[in-house]
């Protein structure tokens, strides 16, 4: 089986759509095996103290392991936390362009191949494995740039909501880019963990 395959062009971005299916896919069995292998080496980082959310960074600033610790795991975002509707910023600005080095401990996994292939097509910032625990949701927020998603473990009750549209992205090896510069959240309404590979994409524009 090929490590990478093309999908039909009709699945590519359409006008006024905030979920863009890409013309690239990966082997879902190898993605899941690699995820399990990394989890056996290193558990999800829960140090941010965000309920039901955790991450593992796959790339970093060269020679700087501190670039994937603490608030640098999450980065700046904007939210409307209360009934006033006033927008506020949270966390710290991140220079995504500096995250060019794949984490050495994970170079033997299938994710290194995935990272290299994606880097040929897109200008990537941070690349992370993101966990959303069962029966939980993220805050309503917006990010500085679009995000690339590869669902690895999911269930039918796991959805991403962008403004007033909800969509389930299946764990079939497919690659999506989502319009995270709009207000959105993600929820896992199932009873199993949701894990996506999520990358910041610095050179992708939505119409």
Image (spheres, helix red, strand yellow):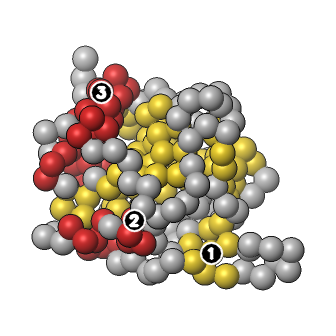
The answer for how far apart the CA atoms under marks 1 and 2 are is 16 Å
Please tell me how crowded label 2 is: few (under 14), some (14-19), or many (20+) other residues with Cα within 10 Å.
many
Q: What residue does disc 2 label? A: 73
Disc 1 secondary structure class: strand
Can you name the residue that lies furthest to the right here?
Answer: 83
Q: Where does residue 165 sit, x and y in percent of width and height?
A: 75, 48
Please tell me whether residue 120 is drawn above or below residue 200 in the rendered image.
Answer: above
Q: Where does residue 132 sit, x and y in percent of width and height?
A: 54, 45
Q: Where does residue 171 sit, x and y in percent of width and height?
A: 49, 29
Residue 121 can be seen in this image = no
User: Observer-nearest residue: 148 or 14?
Assistant: 148
Residue 38 can be seen in this image = yes
The answer for how far apart the CA atoms under marks 2 and 3 are is 23 Å
User: Observer-nearest residue: 11 or 169?
Assistant: 169
Lower sequence index among marks 1 and 2: 2
Q: What residue does disc 1 label? A: 78
Disc 2 secondary structure class: helix
Please tell me whether residue 201 is drawn above or below residue 63 in the rendered image.
Answer: above
The quadrant the C terminus occupies is bottom right
Disc 3 secondary structure class: helix
Instruction: Please give the name of the residue rendered at 38% of the width and 48% of the height, measured from the top-left corner.
Output: 44
Instruction: Please give the name of the residue rendered at 80% of the width and 74% of the height, measured from the top-left corner.
Output: 82
Lower sequence index among marks 3 and 1: 3
The image quarter containing residue 135 is top right
Q: Are marks 2 and 3 in contact (CB under 8 Å)?
A: no
Lower sequence index among marks 2 and 3: 3
The image quarter containing residue 97 is bottom left
Q: Where does residue 21 sit, x and y in percent of width and height?
A: 52, 41
Q: Which mark is residue 33?
A: 3
Please tell me how crowded label 1 is: few (under 14), some (14-19), or many (20+) other residues with Cα within 10 Å.
some
Please tell me how crowded label 3 is: few (under 14), some (14-19), or many (20+) other residues with Cα within 10 Å.
some
Instruction: Please give the name of the residue rendered at 47% of the width and 31% of the height, measured from the top-left corner.
Output: 153
């Amino acid at each position: 089986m090929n490590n990478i395959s093309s999908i039909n062009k009709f699945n590519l971005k359409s006008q006024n759509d905030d979920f863009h299916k890409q013309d690239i896919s990966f082997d879902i069995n190898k993605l899941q095996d690699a995820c399990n292998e990394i989890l056996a080496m290193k558990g999800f980082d829960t140090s941010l103290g965000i309920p039901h959310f955790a991450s593992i960074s796959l790339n970093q600033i060269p020679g700087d392991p501190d670039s994937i610790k603490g608030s640098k795991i999450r980065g700046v975002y904007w939210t409307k936390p209360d009934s006033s509707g006033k927008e506020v910023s949270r966390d710290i600005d991140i220079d995504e362009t500096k995250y060019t080095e794949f984490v050495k401990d994970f170079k033997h996994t299938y994710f290194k191949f995935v990272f290299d292939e994606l880097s040929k097509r897109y200008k990537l910032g941070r690349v992370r494995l993101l966990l959303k625990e069962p029966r939980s949701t993220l805050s309503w927020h917006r990010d500085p740039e679009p995000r690339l998603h590869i669902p690895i473990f999911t269930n039918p009750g796991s959805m991403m909501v962008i403004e007033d549209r909800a969509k389930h992205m299946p764990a079939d090896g497919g690659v999506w880019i989502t319009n995270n510069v709009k207000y959105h959240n993600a929820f896992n309404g199932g009873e199993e963990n949701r894990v996506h590979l999520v990358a910041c994409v610095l050179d992708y524009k939505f119409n």
